Amino acid sequence: MPECPKCHQFVESRAIACPHCRTSLKAHGHPGMKLFRATEGEPLCANCAYHADDSCNFPKRPYALDCTLYQDVRQSQVRSPQYDASFQLQRWVKRNTPLLWIIGLLGISLAVVLMRR
Ligand code: SF4
Ligand SMILES: [Zn+2]
């Protein structure tokens, strides 16, 4: 059974997210998908975006010579979440939601006080 690349707990080979740490997993593989094959003896993983962002839990990684979920990192629009500004902003907002509510309520209170004068 493959393990999660982040928390190293065992996960189902077709899991799309780690049940332990919720990391999204890319290499679950589903029937009917195109099978990519290495052409020059070099494993596909060497140039795969999911190896680069460490989200692959496919057991063949990092030596896969064929894979259904290979994504060429040189042509990929897949960005590492750590460097994605909107992802960072979303995470910050999620983490600071109570603070944002307090600031919002203070702002409304201040507006009400100023309007009464
Ligand atoms: S090519 Fe390698 S890193 Fe990419 S999805 Fe397949 S097994 Fe994972
Ligand atoms: Zn995990």
Image (tube, rainbow, N blue to C red):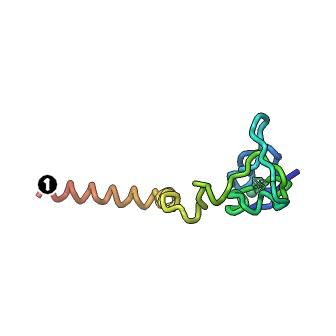
Point out the image quarter for the C terminus: bottom left
Horizontal side of residue 78 vs 48, given as left or right: left
For label 1, the SS is: helix
- Seen in the picture, residue 99 relative to 16 is either above or below; the reply is below
Is 20 in front, or is 25?
A: 25
Classify residue 33 by image quadrant.
top right
Residue at 43% over, 61% down: 99
Residue at 82% over, 46% down: 12
Ligand 2 rendered quadrant: bottom right
Q: Residues within 10 Å of mark 1 (few under 14, many from 20)?
A: few
The spot of residue 85 in percent (x, y) is 49, 62
Instruction: Name the residue that disc number 1 marks.
Output: 116
The furthest residue to the left: 117
Residue at 83% over, 50% down: 66
Q: Amino acid at mark 1?
A: Arg
Horizontal side of residue 24 vs 92, given as left or right: right
Is 40 in front, or is 107?
A: 40
The furthest residue to the right: 1
The spot of residue 32 in percent (x, y) is 77, 34
Classify residue 64 by image quadrant.
bottom right
